[in-house]
Image (cartoon, helix red, strand yellow):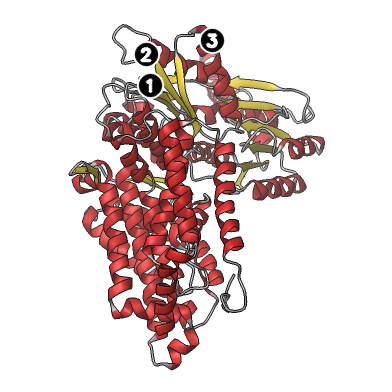
Amino acid sequence: MMNFKKVAMAALVATTALTGAVSARDIEQVGRAAYLSALEGKRVIFIPLSQGMDLNQAWTAVWERHAERYGFDFQVRDPNMDTAAGIRALQGAIADKPDVLIVQNPDVQTYARALKQAQAAGIKILQINMQSITQTDSYVGNDWIEMGRLEAGELAKTCLAEGAPSKKIVWLAGVQTGAANIYMREGLDQVLAENPELELVSDQPADYDSEKARQITETVLQQHPDLCGIMGIWDNAEVGAGAAVVAAGKQDQVTIVTNGAGAATACESIEKGMLDVVYNFNAPIQAEIAAQQISEFLQHPERPAGSEATVFFGPITRVDKDNATGRNCWTIDQLK
Amino acid sequence: MSSAQQDRTSGRAGGSFKITQEGVVTTIAVALFVVFSLVLDKFLTQGNILALLKNVSILGILAVGMGFVVVGRGIDLTMVAVMVVGVAFAIWLSTQGFAFGEAILIGAALVAICGLITGILIAVAEVPPIFATLAMASVVYGGGRVAFNSDVLYAPSGIDWLTYIGSGILFGVPVSVIVFALVAALVALFLQFTRFGRFIYASGDNPATARTSGLPSRTVVIMQYMISALIAYGAGILLTGLVSGINTRLYNSTLIYDVLLVVVLGGISLSGGQGGVRNVLVGTILVGILINGMTIMNFSYTSQNLIKSVILLAALAFDAVINPRDEQTSQSGDI
């Protein structure tokens, strides 16, 4: 009896000790240690177009959060829309040899050579939202041709419907050499070819500036008082088109479709009646997808730069006055 | 001072027997206007003419401010920087709990201080205006970049007067056009009929003589830059009314050169002492007609810029041919 008690006691003690040891040693999320050590101390450099834009602020807010949580170094080298400064920043980044370089291209050509050089120097390159003709390890961003098709399709639906004011539409481009412009125009052309009765009456770049967009719209509205729709490329510029339409008292007649990062300001513009539909590419989610791509690069140092060419097109949500709320309208503070 | 008046009167009387640059530009503007009216459907409609004027009201107001400085032999390259940063600052203040009206007034004070500093650099430290204002523009814009994260700042909604100046209509004319006309009229009257206005012409025509004659040259210069900064601020508020926000990225655009071009094109010499608001209006309207016509014709951006530049260059070259510069007409300080 005594023996049995002793044995039982010993067994109990042993079990407790064993379980204790298990919980201290073995509760380890699978792969976490490897993940942490793969990211720890790595260097990521981002060369944006300009940090003044809402989409850029959203991306960096997300990436900074990842960098802080997992201990990699994240730097932004902002050329502030100056392509010459951008080239210098790229050359500087190549010399610095970070583990990952993130680039937002000003147009398809400018950085093409420097990106090749960076790749040859063994730096993995992620292009975000704006592509270069040089394809690098990864592109995360919009399917711009689809974006053009969506916006033009929206106008085709509205302006070819029964009772539409006319079949006339306007394309307010940004900068004509920008990748986004070239591809959106392709999408628009596809829709125009599918709907030959749709009439493109003006095709002018507003240079991503709301006042320029307002001026063009004001002039076009005089020529085509029965205008049906306007499609643009950035919500912050198309508010100018909206202002011209509101000033002419035609907000019920003219449908303004554009796209944007999904910032709360776009939702406010929809509420004010300056914009009708915003195809929201949700910059915070784009940034999370890009963060996945960054972590994949860092976890696979054995794959050399340029060995893959991955493309991922981010989400696009149609936002109008019925759903201009909640997560479709973020503010920077919510992302930090 | 008398020489300034002489220049002006000879320039004006010159119209009858000698072709002036203002005359050349007016002729081109009228010719374009006639051609566009004949060729372009709906160009010559009340709505389009008002749209044309509305579209150059910002450019025009800035050009009036620039002209005000250039007649005094200065140049103010800070205007666009001051415009965007001043208004952005006011909008930012309004998000920090200030009423929008108060924020606008505080913004005006900041802008006036910027003008004061520029003026002191030029009048007292005697830095050449082109360098002083170029540097100040970077300082002002750079300061703004540090202070505000975003390029585009939206005005608070529900400010009725702001919406009114942007999209209101008074007696059938857009309020923004009326604001432009008022600013132009005020500056014209000020230059023409106040003693201070005459001082500006005098010191623009010959700064050394103006100073030895006992004019308060330094005060005149400082006041000029303060006023041009405030005019730029006014243009910025109007712009905010027009599109419900301000895009500080405008600093990086060619706007400041367009403004300068309008001033020079209209016939205000960079050597100072000559011309007035009328010249600015002529230049502004030519640019307005050109842009409007080309937008209607749906010219591409690149060809628009090319045609605009060629016509403007032609106007300047034509003037140089018919009014060649010689030792008598050129002045020290010509750029």
CA gap, disc 3 and disc 1 = 17 Å
Q: Are marks 2 and 1 on the same chain?
A: yes
Q: Is residue A207 above or below residue B79?
A: above
Q: Chain of mark 3?
A: A
**Circle 2/circle 1 CB separation < 8 Å:** yes
Q: Tell me the kind of residue under disc 2.
A: Cys
Identified by mark 3, the residue type is: Ala
Q: Chain of mark 2?
A: A
Q: Residue at x 63, y 43 (%)?
A: A47
Q: Is residue B169 left or right of residue A254?
A: left
Say which element carries label 2. helix
Name which quarter of the figure residue A254 lies in: top left
Pointer 2: what residue?
A159
- Residue in view at x 43 percent, y 64 percent: B15
Left or right of residue B162, residue A156 in this image: right
Q: As rendered, which of A174 and A263 lies closer to the eye?
A: A174
Q: Chain of mark 1?
A: A
Residue B5, quarter of the rendered image: bottom left
Report, in whole angstroms, how far the alpha carbon at label 2 lies from the one at label 3.
15 Å
* Tag 3 and tag 1, C-beta contact below 8 Å: no
User: On the image, numbered disc 3 is attached to which residue?
Assistant: A193
* Residue located 53% across and 40% down the image: A60
Callout 2 crowding tier (Cα within 10 Å): few <14, some 14–19, many ≥20: many
Q: Is residue A21 visible?
A: no
> Marks 3 and 1: same chain?
yes
Q: Secondary structure at mark 3?
A: helix
Q: Which badge, 2 or 1, comes first in the chain's sequence? A: 2
Where does residue B332 sit, x and y in percent of width and height? 58, 79
- Counting from the top left corner in percent of width and height, residue A334 is at 39, 37
The one nearer the camera, A145 or A75, is: A145
Residue A229: numbered disc: 1
